Image (cartoon, helix red, strand yellow):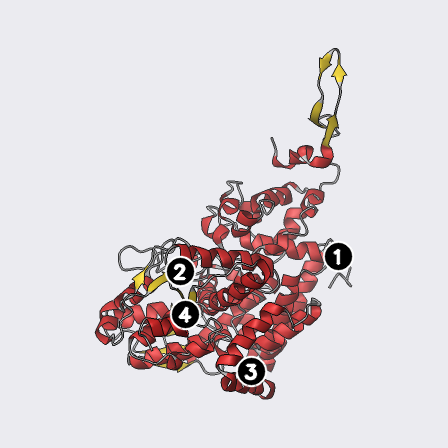
Amino acid sequence: MPIHEKSLIRPENLVEHEELVIDGVDVSGHWSTFIEGRSVPDYNEDLQEEIAALGGGENIHRCWQCGSCTNACTVNAINPDFNPRFWIYLIRMGLEEELVRDREIIWQCVSCNKCTYACPRDVNPEGVMKATAHWLELKGYTETKPSMVFDEEFSHQVFETGKIEEAKVLQKFFKRTNQPLTQPWLIQLVSGLVKRFPVFYLMKLGFATVFHPRTRNWDRSRDAIKEYVDERNAEIHKALKLDAKGAD
Amino acid sequence: MAEGKHKKVAYYPGCALEGTGHAYNRSTKAVGKKLGLDLVELENWNCCGAMEVKNVDPKIQTYLSARNLSIAEDMGFDTVMAPCNGCYHNLKKAEYDLEHDGKSVEVNARLSSKAGHTTYEAGKVETIHALDWIKDSVGEEGITERVKNSLKGLKVANYYGCMYTRPRHIFPEKDKGPGSESTSKPHFMDDLLAAAGAENVEYPLKTACCGGAHSLSDSDTSTKLVLNLLETAEACGADVIATECPTCHTGLEMHQVRAEKVLGRKTNVKVLYFTQLLGMAMGLSPNEVGVNENFSDSRDLIKEKGLA
């Protein structure tokens, strides 16, 4: 049975008849709606190419569905709905609507690379997960997820200065995701350290506000990166058929 | 075990070692000094892109690492040592991509020439981890000779994390039979700590994931993953988890507290960098290896085991 037909046994496609007798035979109970229309009218024939146009997704066409990625997956062990093999299948079949159903979890890939380690076909499933998460955001199916907010803040700082400053990334990340910096576990963490070594910690905090780490003569690298990023964004917008303003 | 190898190497600490992983920086330098190994910091290095930049664009991540490798080359080094798993992984990945992927070579050449520095080409500089550095320079025998304060009686779970071994293809020197590191069952840290007297426990989660990439953006997942690492270490009888990556280390410390606060699951196993353990075994004081900079408070354990 093709994998996408698991839609037929989803709860909303199951019917329950408490009392159903057909031609004298009692067929009461749960039934899947086998006789529903089974044609898929909304193939996106370009879906695989769209994912392949994004960084990390280039090798998706190589997949032969062995399932090693899902078998090895860290997140799958916590949440069985997190299924890289299934999503790669949907993308290759162009089943966009089916893929979009899982838009709230695809971004949760933790980049442990177990899938890429196990993959016999050099698909780089980890990269495909990142490309797919990015695709969902660019197409407007989801808002920017917390991990992407973090990636953006982090990358922005690297592109601008050549280095990162953890406290600054943290602060911006918490602000953009509307999380307070005063979460009980964070307070306990920091206060434990301050109790033990207040002088060092205060000095470190003081230092960080005066000397921001940065790479010297970074301007030309910054400009070169910026130019490349703009070029790539234009390519991606074209490949995904987004209008010029896009979802950026 | 070629005595004298890596006597003087380029050192790439990376951003984490200047921030939350400062204890790793301090203890790595202190251990190097004790072993008579010279570390020369890369001049004006930049961030390797960690786990984040690649999600914006993998080719830029390659460029960032290539720039650091070009600095090592300009400084006349053929070896660069990175103690952080993230940095180590990214330098290795850049090396691989620049050898095998034409597009990466093209983008790196273009960005490097626009930025006005040497364009790094594959094969010029070898990247090693702090574990390779110690293992290949002084080795287990060298450690044993220098032990002043044996780690005897200390039960250690060695935790290597993800980026040190995966994916296999970017580590061509691993899985090469006896003497080489294994990507499925890494043992370099086990070997070094055993040479310092530690009792390594059989820890099945050596290369499991701590969720470090989403430590803050998907904290609940990270807490679950870390709690599993901590509880398993305790079930294996470990007093302490030895780490060799600042992201793992901080993740374990942070989510140990978070698991207690949010899930009500308390664990007592301590977390120390392997360089801190080696340093103390060689007679350095806990403060000299930055034990007071760790979030995880292991002072009582250190006293109890006679390491202070």
Marks 3 and 1: which is nearer the front? 3
Disc 3 and disc 1 in contact, CB within 8 angstroms: no
**3D distance between C-alphas at marks 1 and 4:** 49 Å
Of marks 2 and 4, which one's residue comes earlier in the chain? 2
- Secondary structure beneath disc 4? strand
The chain letter under disc 4 is B
Q: Amino acid at mark 2?
A: Phe
Q: Whole-percent x and y of residue A183?
A: 64, 69
Q: Which mark is residue A242?
A: 1
Q: Residue at x 29, y 79 (%)?
A: B283
User: Against B115, is B177 above or below?
Assistant: above
Q: Which residue is mark 4?
A: B272
Q: Which residue is mark 3?
A: A213
User: Against B301, is A133 above or below?
Assistant: above
Residue A67 vs residue A16, the one in the foreground: A16
Q: Residues within 10 Å of mark 1 (few under 14, many from 20)?
A: some
Q: Which mark is residue B171?
A: 2
Q: Residues within 10 Å of mark 2 (few under 14, many from 20)?
A: some
Q: Amino acid at mark 4?
A: Leu
